[in-house]
Amino acid sequence: MPKQTSLRQEQFSIFTSEHLTFVEQNPNVSSFLASDTCIEIIYATLVSWDMNSRGAKLKDYVDFKSALQGNTAAFQTVEAAAAAFTWTSRGGVVQSISALYNPLALMKTSGKLVSNAKCLHYIFPDLCLPMDRTNTLQKLYGNTYESAARFLDVLEFGYDVLAGIQNPQQYAHGSWNTCPTKLVDNAIILL
């Protein structure tokens, strides 16, 4: 196994165990976003996922925290829509995530798709794929063009894939395939 893949698996394992602990301690999105520790872990995770290197520049921590907490009501709307969510009955979740996409500005740079997808995956792992330019956009579209429409297209694509699998949760286990949306992300990476 290449060294980079091992490092990414290790980072994802750390993310998973820490994330599950914080989700258990903060049973709703409001308490999760009110926790300085949870925000710090999200920020550190995005940094470890290369969201503050090369051309990508995360906002400073204070502005990042403000961007998240300033959208608490929109996160609550996603959480409420998730109660009725299924892979085929997803309109409320797609609509609420779509409404959150533009106001959720986590980067100094203009890109939003990757940072928003990874942040949303961290907060709502069962609802959002952790998209990126190389593995998601390049492989699915042949380019790295970002837009809100493309974000929603990939989200819907993931839901369509999962709707076609009988009980995708049965395949979600271990440190790499942690949830159904990560199964789709991993399949794209394997392309």
Image (cartoon, rainbow, N blue to C red):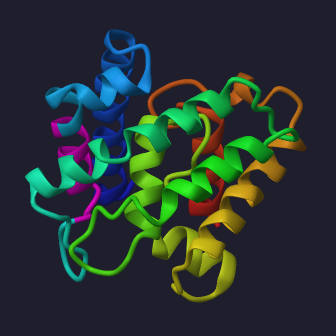
Q: Position of residue 28 (x, y in %)?
A: 44, 19
Q: Is residue 46 magenta?
A: yes
Residue at 72% across, 53% down: 158
- Asked whether residue 131 is in view, the answer is no
Residue at 29% across, 39% down: 10
Q: In this rendered view, identify the residue nearer to me: 29 or 179.
A: 29
Q: In this rendered view, identify the residue nearer to me: 74 or 140.
A: 74
Residue at 33% across, 64% down: 105
Q: Position of residue 82 (x, y in %)?
A: 66, 30
Q: Is residue 116 above or below residue 107?
A: above
User: Does the magenta stretch mainly form a helix, a strand or a loop?
Assistant: helix
The image quarter containing residue 54 is: bottom left
Which residues are the magenta region?
Answer: 40-51
- Asked whether residue 57 is in view, the answer is yes
Residue 130 lies left or right of residue 180; in this view the side is: left
- The number of numbered discs placed on residues in the rendered structure image is 0
Image quarter where the C terminus lies is bottom right
Q: Position of residue 129 (x, y in %)?
A: 57, 51
Residue at 25% across, 63% down: 50
Q: Is residue 87 magenta?
A: no
Q: Position of residue 167 (x, y in %)?
A: 82, 26
The image quarter containing residue 189 is: bottom right
Q: In this rendered view, identify the residue nearer to me: 129 or 108.
A: 108
Q: Is residue 127 above or below residue 104?
A: above
